[in-house]
Amino acid sequence: MNFCSACGATVSFRIPEGDSLPRHVCDTCGEIHYSNPKMVVGAIVESGDRILLCKRAIEPRHGLWTLPAGFMENRETTAQAAARETLEEACARITVGEAFAMVSIPHISQVHLFYRARLAEPGFSPGDESLEVALFDEQDLPWNALAFRSVDLALRRYFEDRRHQRFTFHAEDLDYDARQNM
């Protein structure tokens, strides 16, 4: 960052008074510009014993399967973000249930939050960001073609909880591993 979005003056990268981390600080108006993790929100959409997945039509991970999810927008709740992303990517209306899994991914400054959800009405189709949308049983899920480690982790916890007939909230951290995807 070179210029302040509040007044247009130059900024410097320093630790502001009362803070412990360096930030971009405006040299003229004193505005502190924070850079914080991004929220990615999605849903594990259930239809009977099957789960809805989308094959990505965009990068990163074009052509691989994922849960419907994406960046949360300003002025929406996390549940609204999960419903909106599912509608955008799978043209599916859902009933959002409880939060199921939160995955912190510090090396890319993201937090992924997945809700359990159900199809609110029959029917789905690929949105602009999906090549294909399909329902999968656990044994037919394309485990080797999942786009993101956070999705793999959430789905494994989901099926494990389903086998135990007891769903709990899962909070996990994913460390950087250059050999694996996000």
Image: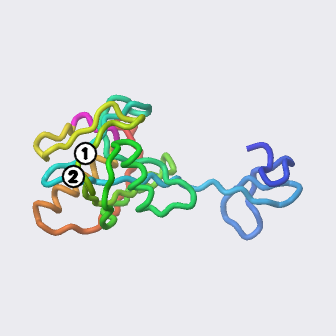
Q: Which of marks 2 and 1 is in front?
A: 1
- Residue 145 inside the magenta-drawn segment: yes
Residue 68, image x and y in percent? 35, 46
Instruction: Label 2: state its secondary structure.
Output: helix
- Could you tell me which residue is drawn at 34 percent across and 59 percent down? 172
Q: In which quarter of the image is residue 159?
A: bottom left
Task: Name the magenta segment's main secondary structure.
Answer: loop
Percent coordinates x, y for residue 26 in the rendering: 82, 54
Disc 1 marks a residue whose amino acid type is Gly
The correct choice, above or below, for 138 with respect to 57 in the image is: below
Q: Please indicate whether residue 158 sits to the left or right of residue 105 in the image.
A: left
Q: Name the residue under label 2.
A: 156
In the rendered structure, which segment of residues is drawn in magenta?
144-148
The answer to if 158 sits in the magenta stretch is no
Residue 140 in percent (x, y) is at 13, 40
Quadrant into which the N terminus falls:
top right
Left or right: 137 in relation to 156: left
Give x and y (percent) for residue 10.
84, 47
Taking depth in this image into account, of 174 and 50 the one nearest to the observer is: 50
Q: Which amino acid does label 2 sit on?
A: Arg
The residue drawn where x is 49% and y is 46% is 108
Quadrant where the C terminus sits is top left
* Residue to which mark 1 is pinned: 123
